Amino acid sequence: MANNAYGIHESDKELTCPPCDWSTVHPFYHHQPKSKRLLTFEKLDNPFPKEITDTDELKAFFRAYKGILVPFAVGQHGTQHSLLRLFNAMPELSTTQGACIMKRKAFVLGGKFDVVRSRDFDFCFEEEQEIIPADKLAYSQFLNDIFYKAGSLKKEILNAFEEFDTNGNAFIEVQISETLGQQTAFVTHHKTERCLYLATSEGQQKYVAISPEWSEKYLDKHSPLEIPLFPTFEEVEGNMRSIIHIKNGNFEWYGRPQSRSSLMYQYREFQDCNYLVKQSANNFVGQIFIEVEQSNPDYASIQHDAGQHASFGERLEYNFTNRSGDPSTIVATERGFGAKPALVKQFTPNTNENWYKVTGEIAENKILVSHGLTRKLVFDDKTGGLTQGGFMDNFTTQEVTHIEQDRNIILSAFNRIFEQLAVFMNENMKDFSLVIKSPIAKIREHENTDQSL
């Protein structure tokens, strides 16, 4: 039998994995003795375990690559790599989650680029040396000479931040090629679903495997790229490559999104919408419950042999319930022959729009809080401009507490890449850093000018 991409033979499937702390990869597990576990979802009627349960094919894949590839999440009964799929689906399924990510992307990265002397984003230096326009122009040209998969530096940064905000991770590959003595740099953001860590022991160099598909069938024919974690560079397919991982949270392998605490409410928004859409499309919600006595079995068998419905209950079911071609709002069942008289019960449907409004607002608020945003910043559509109604005060507070921090996390990673590229390609450029101004910087400048008049 031929070996696959990692040289795995059928007899080698039972491989051991390095010791792993489940609390660093499992989304809902708190490591406690079994009798003192803080939370056990299996005892609750909760949809999440099913949503993040891996398919049989995915389970088989990670069993085959146990000790070689690290799944996004691990549960008490196996891998839960599908948690990543759930995170990635939420911006499309939850309106508020999608709106918050788009707003945060605009607030964090919506301003224009600027160039400063190299800075450490973790430290504040009151006096920064001014840069002459010629140096800014030279550095901007250095950055523009790099090839970006997204087409431009700004798009590459925006894509990385959106992925980071969606699932807590951003993988950015940098590679350097040389042709006839001329060096060329490439920067590529990879979707998290295409990246898996190789299972290395503590203290060893970490590697990220990259593949468009994770299945045994695919890897048997296509070996994934294995790229060392930044700042280590190694030659891969003829180019020097490294990959930097921006990770949110204190986890061993993969990050989790900042908004993970509101995941239940994001899912709730989807549930409400899904229920109403299906109700409208099928025009069926059980409102009348009818339970009737079964027909006399002696006569029912004769009717059944004649190709007719065997009982009144079946006729009711196939003509008026959701099994009918033209369903109505009846739910029908049968009692045994000779039982008590028929039972008819009407249920009042939940048409109270205030109920949906209140529960919807609760979900919205929880999601907003998890993102560090307010309703005014995300949903405020009142007239009067940005300078009225408290928007500017709201934004300033959020920028100091959340927005600037996220901006620095993303830019710090990209500046580390550019600094390393400068070492390889142009030493004169390693003394500069890229920054992004606040998107409302112009408004503040106008306010300051008006106050000085």
Image (cartoon, rainbow, N blue to C red):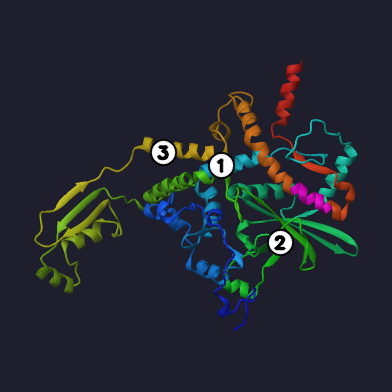
Give the magenta range.
414-421
Asked if the residues shown at circle 1 and circle 3 are in contact, with their CB atoms under 8 angstroms apart, the answer is: no
Is residue 41 visible to us here?
yes
In which quadrant of the rendered view does residue 378 lie?
Answer: top right
Numbered tag placed on residue 88 in the rendering:
none
Numbered tag placed on residue 205 in the rendering:
2
Residue pushed farthest top? 453
Q: Is residue 93 left or right of residue 128?
A: left
Q: Specify the quadrant that holds the N terminus.
A: bottom right
From this view, report whether residue 208 is shown above or below residue 90.
Answer: below
Near mark 3 (Cα within 10 A), the count class, few <14, some 14-19 or many ≥20, is some
Whether residue 420 appears in magenta in the rendering, the answer is yes
Q: Specify the quadrant that holds the C terminus.
A: top right
Image point 87% across, 64% down: which residue? Answer: 179
What is the three-letter code of the residue carrying label 2?
Gln
Numbered tag placed on residue 99 in the rendering:
1
**Alpha carbon of mark 1 to alpha carbon of mark 2: how far?**
38 Å
Identify the residue under disc 3: 359
- Element assignment for label 2: loop
Q: Nearer the viewer, mark 2 or mark 3?
A: 2
